[in-house]
Image (tube, grey):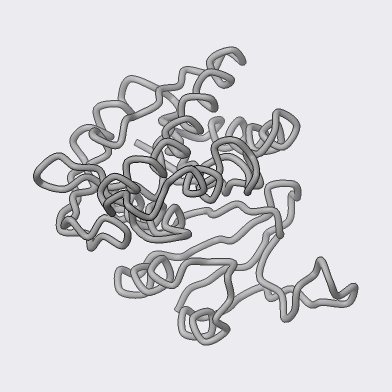
């Protein structure tokens, strides 16, 4: 089975207009095989289901476990919304719940450590559907409680799914079409890198990619293609 793991960030999923750009990449990838689409919560604060919006609803007295349940709503809503729109487009799609995805963690609810990866459920769904949408950022403890992988953890989820499926590359889509030497939104002449090593990426302390994502990819020899949702460019390759 030819499978691609493609992760889309919150700004890529913020609105019907931005999601259409994401779907173009999914449709193109679907010509060549199956797609695992990893989604973040839609938008940024104060968008309704963004992580910070959900956190703003909580008082300080909520436990870490309760806060994990609260913020998990964002990715769950995103996966079901995306699935609904793909189905309306005639695409054979399915949204997996966090209980199915096979990422088992400890019970550090805000920054869980991954203990085991189980691919049986996702393989089953890939045999049944062309596009399987999975919520990023989330795991489940062995006791069946929802956990989160830390802020920006959907990037980490993407490489976990790639490793789970024994793939050697993953595509991460964001509102910037690669890694730059300075913020391209602020600096007109910012230069985009075609390639960076894992260590170079980590040393940049960039917020473009979650450090756990890059560290795990380095350890498991998974290449990361960081691309722009609103671009057709090659983006930046992060590898050895």
Q: Residue at x 25, y 49 (%)?
A: 65
Q: Residue at x 58, y 76 (%)?
A: 206
Which one is in front, 240 or 89?
89
Extreme left residue here? 143
Rendered location of residue 172, percent (x, y): 54, 54
Q: For this view, does 124 lie left or right of residue 167?
A: left
Rendered location of residue 118, percent (x, y): 18, 45
Which one is in front, 31 or 83?
83
Q: Residue at x 45, y 43 (%)?
A: 38
Q: Is residue 211 above or below residue 65?
A: below
Q: How many marks?
A: 0
Q: Is residue 95 above or below residue 148?
A: above
In the figure, residue 153 lies in which quadrant? bottom left
Rendered location of residue 161, percent (x, y): 33, 49
Which one is in front, 143 or 2?
143
In the figure, residue 223 lies in which quadrant? bottom left
Q: Is residue 40 above or below residue 178?
A: above
Rendered location of residue 84, percent (x, y): 53, 18
Quadrant holding the N terminus: top left
Q: Residue at x 49, y 41 (%)?
A: 39
Quadrant holding the C terminus: bottom left
């Amino acid at each position: 089975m030819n499978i691609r793991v493609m992760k889309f960030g919150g700004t890529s999923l913020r609105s019907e207009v931005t999601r259409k750009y994401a779907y173009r990449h999914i449709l193109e990838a679907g010509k060549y095989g199956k797609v695992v689409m990893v989604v973040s919560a839609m938008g940024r604060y104060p968008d309704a289901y963004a992580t910070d919006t959900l956190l703003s609803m909580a008082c300080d007295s909520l436990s870490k476990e309760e806060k994990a349940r609260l913020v998990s709503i964002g990715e769950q809503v995103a996966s079901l919304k995306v699935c609904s729109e793909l189905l309306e487009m005639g695409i054979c799609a399915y949204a997996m719940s966090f209980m199915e995805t096979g990422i088992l963690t400890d019970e550090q609810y805000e920054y869980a450590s991954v203990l085991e990866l189980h691919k049986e459920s996702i393989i089953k769904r890939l045999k049944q559907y062309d596009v399987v949408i999975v919520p990023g950022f989330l795991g489940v403890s062995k006791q069946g409680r929802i956990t989160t992988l830390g802020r920006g953890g959907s990037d980490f989820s993407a490489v976990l799914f790639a490793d789970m499926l024994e793939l050697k590359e993953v595509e991460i889509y964001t509102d910037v079409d690669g890694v730059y030497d300075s913020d391209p939104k602020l600096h007109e002449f910012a230069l985009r890198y075609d390639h960076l090593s894992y260590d170079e990426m980590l040393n940049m302390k960039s917020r473009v990619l979650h450090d756990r994502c890059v560290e795990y990819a380095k350890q498991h020899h998974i290449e990361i293609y960081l691309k722009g949702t609103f671009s057709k460019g090659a983006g930046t390759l992060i590898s050895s």
